[in-house]
Image: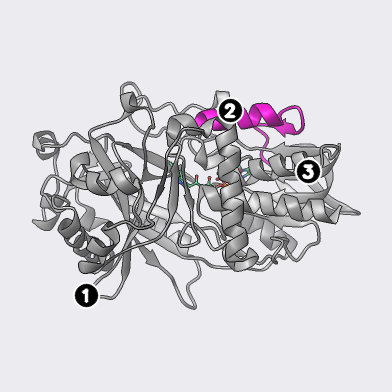
Amino acid sequence: MNFDVIIIGAGPGGIFSAYELSALMPKLKIAVFEAGHALDKRSCPIDGEKIKSCIGCKSCSIMSGFGGAGAFSDGKYNITNDFGGTLYEYIGKDEALSLMRYVDDINMEHGGAGTRLYSTAGTKIKKTCVQHDLHLLDASVRHLGTDINYVVLENLYNSLRDRVSFFFDTPVDTVKRAASGYEIVTGDKSYFCEKCIISVGRSGSKWMERTCRELNIPTKSNRVDIGVRVELPAEVFSHLTDELYESKIVYCTKEYGDKVRTFCMNPRGVVVNENTNGIITVNGHSYEDPARQTANTNFALLVAKHFSEPFKDSNGYGESIARLSNMLGGGVIVQRFGDLIRGRRSNQNRIDEAFITPTLKATPGDLSLVLPKRILDGIIEMIYALDKIAPGTANDDTLLYGVEVKFYNMEVEVNSDLESCLEGLYIIGDGSGITHSLSHASASGVHVARRIAAEK
Ligand SMILES: Cc1cc2nc3c(=O)[nH]c(=O)nc-3n(C[C@H](O)[C@H](O)[C@H](O)COP(=O)(O)OP(=O)(O)OC[C@H]3O[C@@H](n4cnc5c(N)ncnc54)[C@H](O)[C@@H]3O)c2cc1C
């Protein structure tokens, strides 16, 4: 079967390229191939009662399916060049911001209207942070919440399904060069297209590596971020989260000069398992609907690790640390901060007696047996630094879940059109290693669609 454009992956990158292409060129024959399920079929079996932890489904509904890894995410669209990816290095800072704002407009038209846009502009919190050697990054944050994010995706799908052919539960095995364009092989079937957009996200990282090898597309290794998810009573951070919702705060450790940062802050949210290629790590999200909110706020504290020659496999390093926690805890480990600094493991009794109820069922344990000393020391130092702007952060009962790992795909060599060295083959979103967020991945999809439309 022939198409003008085939998009691989229906995450934010794939969805927004399909949206923009079909809007600009309604006659174009566009297909989207997605390894996971359609949106209404996506459901994680963990119910907290019968199934308490990850059972390793063939297709993980948290990471795969229409909406991609973003579908059950907190739906925080950070409109900024300060974090979330380096798209601006390819397309320029103004263009990147303008595309992120355009994505925000589309989301508002599709069910997001009424959600709040937070901003760091003019906040006094910045001054308080810097007085304690903490650095607040600039951003506007649209918080859709997991519930509204789902509604927006539903509406986007309804507006796309008559204009675009969707193939769900259809993982692409191979991309081959064809006489004119590309052959997309899935199972025993082949589809042909003139142009192909690859947007396979983090869950497609191993596939992306293989595809780049097979097609001789140059790549370079990226970093890996390792750390923990912190959970504490919502009151401790409420003066920050009420005003900014999410604050990205960076701290440089006195001991090693490493940068530690807060990441993915979820006021009154829940901590969840994340399954990446069979390895269980931790993540978090929250709901816009007050009825579904909890008494706790969670956020990650991450330390970035870059490796120099000869070691290239930064993701492999992160995976090994996550495997260690899976080996000791059968999944994610939880430890009270007080236990960690006293050098003892947390047990179920200590967790049950704490003044905070964990939102994720994890195995009480000892994170110092899992995390490298340098990373753990950095996290402890950052917790004490945060305690100065949000007293209570360093309380004994603060919960630390480990490990949280942010895997980055290796960076694929692309030009300012996000086109690889092969003409007509575009690589976008988190799968390219260039973006690490909803807004940057979506913006990369719009950018590529406009480049393709301009050429036609
Ligand atoms: C729990 C969680 C919470 C998050 N919260 C936020 C947040 O609040 N804000 C934020 O900015 N970011 C958040 N993120 C990150 C965000 O979801 C990603 O940055 C974003 O989804 C990347 O979009 P993408 O389209 O590049 O890739 P993805 O969303 O990963 O989509 C890629 C799609 O490609 C499919 N695929 C992979 N391989 C193949 C193949 N061979 N054939 C066919 N299909 C394939 C996958 O199934 C997947 O559906 C969160 C992530 C998680 C897991």
| Residue occupying image coordinates x 44% and y 51% | 140
User: Residue 79: percent from the left, percent from the top?
Assistant: 49, 52
Asked if residue 274 is positioned above or below residue 99 in the image, the reply reads above
The quadrant where residue 218 appears = bottom right
Q: Which residue is mark 3?
A: 24
| Residue occupying image coordinates x 16% and y 56% | 387
Q: Which mark is residue 255?
A: 1
Q: Real-space Cα distance between discs 1 and 3?
A: 54 Å
User: Which mark is first along the chain, 3 or 2?
Assistant: 3
Disc 3, SS: helix
Whether residue 172 sits left or right of residue 69 in the image: it is: right
The residue lying furthest to the front in this view is: 122
Q: Residues within 10 Å of mark 2 (few under 14, many from 20)?
A: some
Q: Which residue is mark 2?
A: 154
Q: Real-space Cα distance between discs 2 and 3?
A: 21 Å
Give, as a single range, the part of the protein colored magenta. 150-171
Mark nearest the camera among 2 and 3 is: 3
Whether residue 212 sits left or right of residue 403 in the image: it is: right
Mark nearest the camera among 1 and 2 is: 2
Q: Do tag 2 and tag 3 residues touch (Cβ < 8 Å)?
A: no
